[in-house]
Image (tube, rainbow, N blue to C red):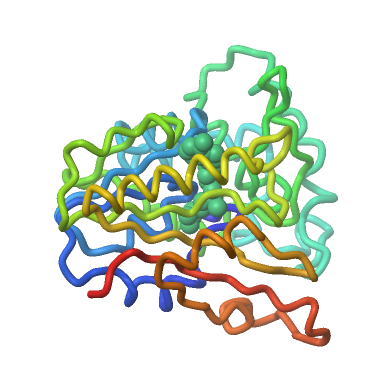
Amino acid sequence: MNYTGGKFRLLGQILPLFPKKIDTFVDLFCGGCNVGVNVVADQVIFNDINTHLLCLYDAFRNLGSKLVLSMIDEIIADYNLSRSTDKGYDFYGCDSSNGLSKYNQKPYLELRNDYNYKNKNYNNYIMLYVLIVYAFNNQIRFNSKNEFNLPVGKRDFNNKMKSKLIDFVDRISENNFSFTNLNFRIFDVSTLTNSSLVYCDPPYLITCATYNENDGWNEQSECDLQKFLDDLHTHGIKFSLSNVLSTKGRTNVLLAEWSKKYLVFHLNHSYANSNYQIKNKNNVTDEILVVNYQD
Ligand SMILES: C[S@@+](CC[C@H](N)C(=O)[O-])C[C@H]1O[C@@H](n2cnc3c(N)ncnc32)[C@H](O)[C@@H]1O
């Protein structure tokens, strides 16, 4: 899944830092599930507080990739959204650098309107998925009235996205994967052992994302998570925390202090974002992985 803050590009650096043998892997802030679906473990539990996301995964698992794809095709065709892979950008009067937003604006708003206010004969979550695909930067954002409120984006359901979706739906449908929709504070760790790993990729205190909006993540959340991780450590359960220590001249002071107790790996952020040019030292993002084990 394309997901804001997704760890796909950092997997090559993160996965080798996990323990060699994991019985239960918990992806506690799973978002687009990029880490959990790529890890080797006996079982994986995905958790996120975002109910829309968890219901979408539930729909994917219940329907299976074949049915999901045919439902997506039907919605795209009914709303006359673009299919650039089949017809090319010229057909829609658009080009690849400016993207397809000019053409998709009208059908996208119609789909968004129907999703928000009407009871159409489509699976609600597949409608949501199509919205995410055609939305600005493939993001998910709902306002306080629970209305999906992102503007149209530049891209469409191209072949790359299609094959990634098939892989994703097939993978999350495997038997050893389960999903929970909880605030991390109440996630039950009582069945975990000293061969389990709790991986945390929370919203970052010093960066912006849709899930940080409306006080979605604040200093209290940061402290509660640190306490949660300290408790895991006390009980001999391994954890691994992704985070940003500093960026654009800002430092997460709470994290800097707390992480001194554990092992900190500094990941190569500029390598992970190949377009990113480090022109100014203040622009360097110090992306880290904090772990409480040596394996
Ligand atoms: C940085 S994203 C995770 C990205 C994910 N690792 C990936 O690779 O796609 C952070 C996630 O934390 C979730 N989240 C925010 N507050 C939470 C909470 N209190 N408990 C559980 N999940 C939460 C957000 O909904 C968001 O999906």
Residue 173 percent coordinates (x, y): 26, 44
Answer left or right for 246 relative to 171: right
So how many labels did they put on this image?
A: 0
Nearer to us in this view, 40 or 221: 221
Nearer to us in this view, 66 or 6: 6
Residue 64 percent coordinates (x, y): 30, 40
Residue 189 percent coordinates (x, y): 26, 39
Nearer to us in this view, 144 or 247: 247
Which residue is at 18% across, 50% downward? Answer: 43
Which residue is at 72% across, 78% downward? Answer: 284
Residue 214 picture quarter: top right
Q: Relative to 231, is 264 above or below?
A: below
Answer left or right for 267 relative to 217: left
Which residue is at 56% across, 31% downward? Answer: 127
The quadrant the C terminus occupies is bottom left
Q: Can residue 72 be seen in this view?
A: no
